[in-house]
């Protein structure tokens, strides 16, 4: 828990944490979808989205700036970071109190943020926001110290507590939104407690110097950039009801879109784990070439591993929706296809943003990201009144890919980017074509034969990727050694 770990180990640990927590996230959402009416599920989904947006804000500035400070201090020989810790704690908890107070004041006086939600759930969510502010700083310290196992453990504890308590309160007591609120608060407290326990040897005393504005000059642009990027991932859910009001978009339709977004954005969790694991190594790189090398180490897994997962959602979403959700959510298939394509852009944009922040380009990135958020909003304004949930999905996809364009242009300006070899591109395209063909067959095969065909397509793609040398040889050897297998690779 307290040992420093390499980028490869950190990525593996965080991906394992995602593999553990993502199913639990979906168990939670599935249980709520089955236990609650569609309209009430839409309301609870809006509550979850508000906390997600607040978490994005609170994870954006001070925690990442602290991670950068800790990573650099460890590389330089253990420079004292006590003042930086105190500054991050004061700044982020203060920001959390401000966000929680503002949210509670607006919701309790107008009810505009979470329609139909009363004072109890409002105050619970506000309390969860403050606890999240504390926990995110502690996680930032763990990331900078490269204690990725501790990061994964804290996140796992948060999800386990939330799911067990939330499902129990809703299913056994019929607690509804209040039960979800208690679960969110308890989960945030569990994550913060776990992070504190594994970081306590690095935490400073409460008395002492506090890093001032100069020490955390990077926090503001990091926060602005990450918050802007976080809006791209949440505006579709937050604005759908408001823009669709009077145009046939009901709370039930919002609930359908919640299911579509939840399913189609699942690969983003894995992409985020990759970018978080490589962040401290990019931050402590000596020059742009070394930083780009670390970036490529993580980025190459987008086409290799995440694109196949996205293709399953694009080509045959009915295979998953029909088995996971009640029949009332069958209409989510169309939005899932579009949101999944947007999720691929969101993964790439997230990795670009964190790499730029690690290299000190957070400010210029933050200036460019509003263009992506604006593109999303404009697209939704134009399409939601006439196309409902599908319009929201298109808006999300447009915003996500515009972020890739603006951040990619900035990244290329400051890094020397090589070209992908034609042979590699052709082999990847051929392997992907095999996968798409089998997925297309699964889409028309019907229940019973579809899942085996999806599995066959993924396995076939994986075999071709290994045999054709698309997967790095070092990773093949590492997996082979751990599993005791003999893997043949040509290239």
Image (cartoon, rainbow, N blue to C red):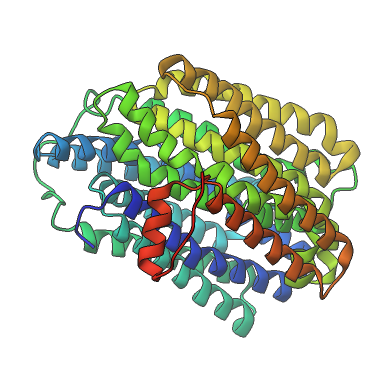
State the residue at coordinates (41%, 40%). 297
The answer to whether residue 134 is above or below residue 356 is: below
Q: Name the residue: 41% across, 32% down.
A: 355
Q: Residue furthest bottom?
A: 172
On the image, the x and y values in percent for residue 127 come to 43, 57
Tell me the quarter of the picture where residue 427 sits. Answer: top right
Judge whether 22 appears above or below 142 on screen: below
Front-lying residue, 418 or 40: 418
Q: State left or right for residue 21 relative to residue 317.
A: left
**Count of all numbered marks drawn on residues in the image:** 0
Q: Is residue 205 visible?
A: yes
Q: Residue furthest top?
A: 413
Looking at this view, is 258 or 20 the one in front?
20
The image quadrant that residue 385 belongs to is: top right
In this picture, is 23 found above or below 269?
below
Q: Position of residue 63 (x, y in %)?
A: 33, 41
**x then y, percent, for residue 405:** 60, 23
Picture quarter with the N terminus: bottom left
Q: Residue at x 51, y 37 (%)?
A: 350
Residue sitting nearer the eye, 450 or 262 = 450
Left or right placement of residue 302 versus residue 482 in this view: right
User: In the displayed structure, would residue 143 be above or below residue 376?
Assistant: below
Residue 316 shows in the view: no
Q: Name the side, left or right, on which 124 lies relative to 363.
A: right
- In the rendering, at what x and y percent does residue 181 appear? 53, 64
Residue visible at 60% across and 83% down in the picture: 173
């Amino acid at each position: 828990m307290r040992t420093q770990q390499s980028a490869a180990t950190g990525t593996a640990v965080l991906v394992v944490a995602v593999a553990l927590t993502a199913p639990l996230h979906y168990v939670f959402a599935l249980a709520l979808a089955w236990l609650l009416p569609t309209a009430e599920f839409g309301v609870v989904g809006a509550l979850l989205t508000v906390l997600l947006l607040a978490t994005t804000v609170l994870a954006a500035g001070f925690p990442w700036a602290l991670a950068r400070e800790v990573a650099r201090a460890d590389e330089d020989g253990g420079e004292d970071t006590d003042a930086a810790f105190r500054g991050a704690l004061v700044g982020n908890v203060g920001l959390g109190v401000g966000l929680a107070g503002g949210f509670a004041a607006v919701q309790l006086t107008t009810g505009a943020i979470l329609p139909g939600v009363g004072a109890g759930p409002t105050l619970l969510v506000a309390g969860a926001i403050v606890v999240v502010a504390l926990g995110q700083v502690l996680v930032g310290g763990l990331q900078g110290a490269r204690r990725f196992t501790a990061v994964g453990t804290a996140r796992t504890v948060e999800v386990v507590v939330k799911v067990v308590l939330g499902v129990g309160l809703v299913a056994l007591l019929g607690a509804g939104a209040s039960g979800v609120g208690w679960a969110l608060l308890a989960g945030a407290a569990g994550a913060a407690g776990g992070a504190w326990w594994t970081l306590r040897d690095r935490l400073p005393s409460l008395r002492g110097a506090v890093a001032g504005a100069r020490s955390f000059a990077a926090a503001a642009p990091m926060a602005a950039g990450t918050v802007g990027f976080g809006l791209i991932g949440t505006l579709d859910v937050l604005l759908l009801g408001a823009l669709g009001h009077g145009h046939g978009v009901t709370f039930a339709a919002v609930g359908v879109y919640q299911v579509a977004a939840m399913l189609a954005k699942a690969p983003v969790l894995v992409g985020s784990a990759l970018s978080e694991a490589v962040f401290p190594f990019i931050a402590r790189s000596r020059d742009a070439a070394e930083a780009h090398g670390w970036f490529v180490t993580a980025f190459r897994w987008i086409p290799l591993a995440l694109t196949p997962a996205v293709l399953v959602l694009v080509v045959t979403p009915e295979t998953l929706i029909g088995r996971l959700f009640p029949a009332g959510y069958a209409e989510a298939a169309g939005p899932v296809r579009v949101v999944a394509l947007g999720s691929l852009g969101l993964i790439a944009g997230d990795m670009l943003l964190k790499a730029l922040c690690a290299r000190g380009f957070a400010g210029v990135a933050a200036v460019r990201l509003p263009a992506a958020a604006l593109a999303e909003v404009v697209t939704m304004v134009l399409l939601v009144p006439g196309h409902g949930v599908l319009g929201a999905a298109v808006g999300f996809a447009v915003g996500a890919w515009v972020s890739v364009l603006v951040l990619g242009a900035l990244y290329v300006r400051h890094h020397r980017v090589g070209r992908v070899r034609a042979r590699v591109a052709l082999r990847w395209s051929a392997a992907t074509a095999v996968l798409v063909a089998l997925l297309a067959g699964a889409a028309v095969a019907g229940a019973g034969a579809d899942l085996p065909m999806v599995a066959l397509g993924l396995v076939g793609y994986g075999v071709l990727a290994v045999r054709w040398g698309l997967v790095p040889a070092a990773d093949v050897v590492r997996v082979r050694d751990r599993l005791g297998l003999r893997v043949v690779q040509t290239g």
